[in-house]
Image: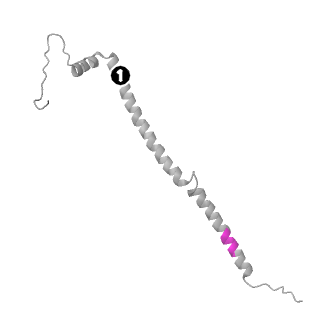
Amino acid sequence: MVTSTRRRRGSGRGRLLLRRLAIGGAVLAAVWFAVFGGEYGWLDLRSRTERREGLEAEVARLQAVVDSLRAELVAVESDPLTIERIAREEYGMVKGNRELLYRFVDDDMP
C-alpha cells in the first residue's frame, strides 16, 4: 500500500484565496448593513434628521403665531385704542354726537 504524500500545487493557495474572499465579502456585507441596513441606518437617520429639522421650523413658526396672538389678546383686554378700533370696525359704533356712520350697500347683493 502506497500513500501519496504529495500535494497538488495551487490547491492550498486556492483555498486560502477563497477563504480570504469569503471573509472579505462577509466584512463588506457587515459594513454595508451597519451603514445602510437596519432601523438606524445612515439613510434612515438622514431622513429622520430632515424630518426633525422640518418639525423644528414648524414649531418656531407656530410659536411666532402664538406670541402674536398673545400680544393681540393683551391689547384687546387692556388697550383702549384697540378696543375702540374693534368697536368701530366690527360693531359699527360711533363716538358721541360728533360722528356719523355711513353704510354702503351693494346693489348686487341679495
| Residue 19 is covered by the magenta coloring | yes
Amino acid identity at mark 1: Leu
Q: Which residue is mark 1?
A: 73
Label 1, residues with CA under 10 Å away: few <14, some 14-19, many ≥20: few
Residue 51 is one of the magenta-drawn residues: no
Q: Residue at x 34, y 16 (%)?
A: 78
Residue 23 x, y percent position in the rendering: 68, 67
Examine the image and state in which quarter residue 90 appears.
top left
Of residues 57 and 26, the one nearer the viewer is 26
Could you tell me which secondary element the residue under label 1 belongs to?
helix
List x then y, in percent, for residue 98. 14, 12
What colouring does the structure picture have? one colour
The residue lying at 45 percent from left, 40 percent from top is: 56
**Furthest residue toward bottom:** 1
Q: Quadrant of residue 83?
A: top left
Quadrant, the N terminus: bottom right
On screen, residue 56 above or below 35: above
50 lies above or below 86: below
The part of the chain drawn in magenta is 17-22
Q: Residue at x 72, y 76 (%)?
A: 15
Predominant SS of the magenta segment: helix
Q: Position of residue 55 (x, y in %)?
A: 45, 41
Q: Is residue 50 left or right of residue 94?
A: right
